[in-house]
Image (tube, grey):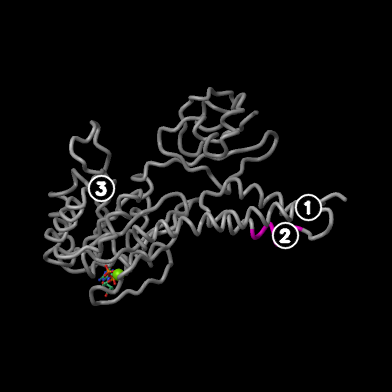
């Protein structure tokens, strides 16, 4: 008896292959299970799928256990990249998360509202970036599990309250606490190999509460002191002023590119770009999709900048944001 699977099943299967996290994979496998017609013809497939789901579940459980023994505030990664909000109490971290992502963490006019991480997804053009709110850092205290999460993330938003007279002191506290945890924040990776044991982290200064009196003066001072080391974005999270330049700066600082794929004779799949580091090549895109893709690749056609309108390109051809690739096996 033939399986006669509906087209939605094959679409889900394709999304499964492109999934980047186990959580995503599990959700898709469950969808596939729901879609699959349950009859004799699908007996074997049903068995395979059930086995896959239980294998994945036990793998995920094992991972959480390992995670728990080291730190229990691990955030499951989702989206194209992860960005962490850091700051002293009350600077508006939770408000920024809410304004950029629509998530609803507790925002309050008193310190220490957020003792754990809170997560939201920020839309940027056709991708989503995960934003993580963290507990406040002070001169005296930083959650012991926080450095691990900082070391693991793609970019930091060093959040400053432009309404506070102590804003420079706040900035110094953040830099100092990071350095005590062997993390050096800055705009770009240093060119030469680090001589110390510092882990470099890309960072943006997120200068919030631009709407408050005195903010313009404070911003000027902040720029005088720090604009060589960090990109500085000023905005008001509460009044939603100048949030778009902040979104844009987050994207460019992440140094990622989006690559779309197409099948021969079909339109480009614009739904689900492959996310790669800037400087990646054709072969990296193939590998990101599946290792068989990379191994069996015969040639690739590329669309993108005007010089490439479906020409064949080499495996080591450099990629630019928004290039389109058609792999031939
Ligand atoms: N004036 C002004 N107040 C803000 C802005 N963003 C946040 N706040 C206020 O600052 C206080 C602390 O905000 P919250 O997000 O809880 O700070 P967190 O402790 O850093 O998470 C709250 O009263 C917010 O309403 C802003 O852009 N402008
Ligand atoms: Mg908060």
Is there a contact, CB below 8 Å, between mark 2 and mark 1? yes
Q: Nearer the viewer, residue 47 or 111?
A: 47
Near mark 2 (Cα within 10 A), the count class, few <14, some 14-19 or many ≥20, is some
- Which residue lies under the disc numbered 3? 231
Near mark 1 (Cα within 10 A), the count class, few <14, some 14-19 or many ≥20, is few
In screen coordinates, is 197 left or right of 148?
left
Q: How many labels does the image show?
A: 3
- What residue is at 61 percent from the left and 57 percent from the top? 54
Vertical placement of residue 264 versus 119, above or below: above
Question: Element under label 2?
Answer: helix
Vertical placement of residue 115 versus 149, above or below: below
Is there a contact, CB below 8 Å, between mark 2 and mark 3? no
- Image quarter where ligand 1 lies: bottom left
Q: Which of labels 3 and 1 is toward the front? A: 1
Q: What stretch is highlighted in magenta?
A: 30-36
- Which residue lies under the disc numbered 2? 35
Q: How far, Cα to Cα, is label 2 from label 1?
A: 8 Å
| Magenta stretch, overall SS | helix
In screen coordinates, is 112 left or right of 121?
left
Say the numbered circle drawn on residue 5.
Answer: 1
In screen coordinates, is 244 left or right of 138?
right
Q: Which of 110 and 303 is in front in this view?
A: 110
Q: Which of marks 2 and 1 is nearer the N terminus?
A: 1
């Amino acid at each position: 008896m033939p399986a006669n699977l509906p087209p939605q099943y094959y679409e889900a299967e394709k999304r499964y292959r492109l999934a980047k996290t186990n959580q995503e994979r599990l959700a898709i496998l469950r969808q596939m299970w729901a879609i699959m017609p349950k009859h004799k013809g699908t007996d074997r497939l049903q068995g395979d799928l059930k086995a896959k789901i239980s294998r994945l579940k036990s793998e995920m459980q094992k991972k959480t256990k390992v995670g728990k023994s080291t730190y229990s505030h691990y955030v499951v990664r989702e989206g194209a990249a992860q960005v962490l909000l850091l700051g002293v109490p009350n600077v508006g971290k939770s408000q920024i998360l809410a304004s950029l992502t629509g998530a609803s963490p507790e925002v309050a006019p008193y310190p220490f509202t957020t003792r754990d991480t809170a997560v939201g997804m920020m839309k940027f053009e056709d991708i989503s970036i995960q934003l993580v709110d963290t507990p406040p850092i002070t001169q005296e205290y930083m959650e012991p599990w926080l450095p691990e999460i900082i070391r693991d993330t793609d970019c930091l938003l060093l959040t400053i309250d432009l309404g506070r007279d102590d804003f420079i002191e706040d900035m110094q506290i953040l830099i100092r606490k990071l350095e005590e945890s062997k993390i050096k924040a800055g705009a770009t990776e240093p060119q030469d190999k680090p001589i110390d044991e510092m882990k470099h982290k890309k960072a943006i200064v997120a200068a919030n509460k631009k709407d408050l009196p005195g903010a313009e003066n404070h911003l000027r001072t902040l720029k005088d002191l720090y604009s060589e080391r960090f990109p500085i974005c000023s905005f008001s999270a509460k009044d939603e002023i100048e949030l778009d330049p902040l979104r844009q700066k987050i994207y460019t600082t992440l140094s990622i590119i989006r690559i779309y794929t197409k099948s021969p004779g079909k339109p480009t799949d614009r739904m689900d770009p492959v996310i790669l580091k800037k400087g990646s090549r054709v072969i990296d895109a193939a590998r990101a999709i599946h290792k068989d893709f990379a191994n069996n690749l015969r040639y690739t056609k590329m669309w993108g900048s005007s010089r490439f309108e479906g020409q064949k390109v080499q495996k080591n051809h450099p990629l630019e944001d928004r290039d389109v690739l058609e792999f031939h096996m």
